Amino acid sequence: MDVNTLRSVVTLLSFLAFAWIVWQAWRKSAQADHAAAAVLPFEDEPLPAVSKPSALPTGAVQ
């Protein structure tokens, strides 16, 4: 096996690994996992207090 054959095999395996990673990330069944991971940084923060409509500043649109 010469060096160019080895380079071709490594390139092909790298492309297949890339395609597999993209497929794993964009499949429909992974959407729920991504949505859960998206809110992880905000889980420790307290929820903001809900303001009453009368507490809106003057001129604010409801």
Image: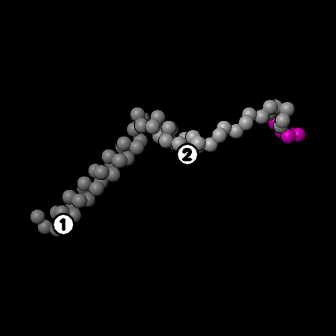
Looking at the picture, which amino acid does disc 2 mark?
Pro
Left or right position of 62 against 35: right
Q: Is residue 9 above or below residue 55?
A: below
Residue drawn at point x = 26 percent, y = 59 percent: 11
Left or right position of 33 against 20: right
Name, please, the residue furthest toward the bottom: 3
Residue drawn at point x = 55 percent, y = 45 percent: 41
Name, please, the residue furthest toward the right: 58
Q: What label does residue 58 carry, if any?
A: none
The foreground one among 33 and 8 is 33
Q: Secondary structure at mark 2?
A: helix
Based on the displayed image, in which of its 4 quarters is residue 58 positioned? top right
For the residues bearing labels 2 and 1, Cβ distance under 8 angstroms: no
Residue 60 falls inside the magenta stretch: yes
Based on the displayed image, in which of its 4 quarters is residue 13 positioned? bottom left
Residue that badge 2 annotates: 41
The foreground one among 33 and 11 is 33
| Residue 39 rendering spot, x and y as whole percentages | 55, 41
Q: Please provide the residue range marked out in magenta.
A: 57-61
Q: Is residue 10 above or below residue 42?
A: below
Local crowd size for mark 1, using a 10 Å CA cut-off: few (<14), some (14–19), many (≥20): few
Residue drawn at point x = 53 percent, y = 42 percent: 40
Left or right position of 8 against 2: right
Quadrant for the C terminus, please.
top right
As measured in the structure, the alpha-carbon distance from the residue carrying label 2 to the one carrying label 1 is: 46 Å
The foreground one among 32 and 17 is 32
Looking at the picture, which amino acid does disc 1 mark?
Asn
| Residue 1 rendering spot, x and y as whole percentages | 11, 64
Residue that badge 1 annotates: 4
Q: Closer to us: mark 2 or mark 1?
A: 2
Tell me which label, 2 or 1, sits earlier in the chain. 1
Q: Secondary structure at mark 1?
A: helix
